[in-house]
Amino acid sequence: MFKKILIANRGEIALRVLRACRELGIKTVAIHSEADETAMHVRMADESICVGPASAQSSYLNIPAIITAATLTNVDGIHPGYGFLSENQRFAEIIEEHNIKFIGPHSNHIKIMGNKIDAKKIMDENNVPTVPGLNDISDIKNIKNFIKNVKLPIIVKAASGGGGKGMRVVSKSDEIENAINSAKAEAKKSFNDDKVYLEKFLTTPKHIEIQILSDAHGNVITLGERDCSIQRKHQKLIEESPSELLSNEKRKEISDLCKKAVSSIGYEGVGTLEFLYEDDNFYFMEMNTRLQVEHPVTEMVTGIDLVKEQILAASGEKLKISQSDIQIKGHSIECRINAEHPESFIPSPGKITQYHQPGGLGVRVDSAVYQGYSVPPHYDSMIGKLITYADNRKECIARMNRALEEYIIMGINTNIQLHQKIIMSEEFKSGKYDINFMSTFN
Ligand code: MV4
């Protein structure tokens, strides 16, 4: 078992990992930038070490500084959290070369899933349904044929992409060449890899993802799904579990396929398979090889501490939970609380002059801010997550509304009221919303 873990992150996820470590009796080392000296994750950790100036590039993404911190503090594990270096193959590799355990999958698996074409191939080989696509676009005849088969619109995607970069939707056949060329240029600039592929463009899908957990001994379980369709500009806003539209049969069918696929490559730790879901069909898009922001809704409906399980799995322990232990019970919703202007969505850093967070039955707040804290301008604007749990979806929504009402954050702008408007809308209440929800919401 680990004795001391370095947490290579900041904010609420650094606290989330720290809490899991505490419960497991593992000592913690926080890293921080010069702008984060007063951050809560620094205060709460057993030790802390400054890894560089304010900019993420010079601190939380500074691999040599982080490795030096890990060596100086003599840790035996590094948890990357999400974002920053969590899906950086080179970071995972270097950590292993220093005989420290990267708390995440093997670097090879980060690499494989980092290439969406390779990821789709693995899923395809395991009968996981993927979005109909064309990988080899060197011959225009193949492209013409593909379009004849799947019909326009299609979408051009970067093989190394994610978060919408290097993506182009094509609705007219004379736009294809331009779309491919500009997607390639953007992909080259963003990922230093200009490989792109084509997919049929689904116009009104939901974004549904499946959580998996596996150990180093070939045991894999799934923990149901999350509906993450409420998003804006590829930033998720609200996530929930279970999805209102999914039957138990459909859930089991897709979960079994996901398990088979991840065990075929010997994947270890937590992971998420992202799907588009349209007309009762799943279409695999990509796999995330990290702990995700929205993991709490899965924890609430399964009762499983995903971060503790992730750490135990990384230490080489056998999974103590089997699939038959997993029962999806009740309903959970997460609202991402951002420091941003409610209409323009422009980040709103600054000092929190008054702070009071909601509580009571079925309310969970994962946040690292406090009264008097100054939200620095250098990082993501998400300052916390409000998660509610109840017996059913209707009560969960009512509880979320009540909790949002209670939440007091003064001194900066937040999206708390926007969340209230969304969850009380008829479309959200129906559960039938898709990924286009926010583009028409006002
Ligand atoms: C798609 C799609 C429709 N059809 N692929 C957006 C981010 C990247 N991970 C993939 N994305 C999409 N791929 C096909 N074939 C629509 C999107 C998409 C989207 C997906 C999930 C959640 C929000 C989204 C917002 C815009 C576009």
Image (spheres, rainbow, N blue to C red):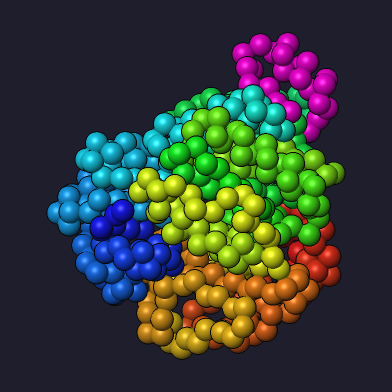
Q: Residue 63 appears at what percent x and percent y?
A: 27, 45
Q: Depth check: 354 or 259 in front?
A: 259
Q: Residue furthest left?
A: 72
Taking the spot 63% from the left edge, 44% from the top edge, the residue there is 274
Q: Residue 260 appears at what percent x and percent y?
A: 62, 34
Examine the rendering and report whether any part of residue 58 can be seen: no
Taking the spot 78% from the left edge, 59% from the top edge, the residue there is 244
Q: Depth check: 68 or 193 in front?
A: 68
Q: Depth check: 372 or 399 in front?
A: 399
Vertical placement of residue 392 versus 212, above or below: below
Label tally: 0
Judge left or right: residue 228 versus residue 281: left
Examine the rendering and report whether any part of residue 127 can be seen: yes
Judge left or right: residue 81 versus residue 395: left
Vertical placement of residue 241 versus 161, above or below: below
Q: Residue 378 appears at what percent x and percent y?
A: 38, 62
Taking the spot 45% from the left edge, 58% from the top edge, the residue there is 307
Q: Quadrant of the C terminus?
A: bottom right
Residue 20 belongs to magenta span: no
Vertical placement of residue 295 versus 392, above or below: above
- The residues colored magenta run 132-154
Q: Residue 181 appears at what percent x and percent y?
A: 59, 26
**Residue 430 picture quarter:** bottom right
**Residue 169 picture quarter:** top right
Taking the spot 40% from the left edge, 37% from the top edge, the residue there is 106
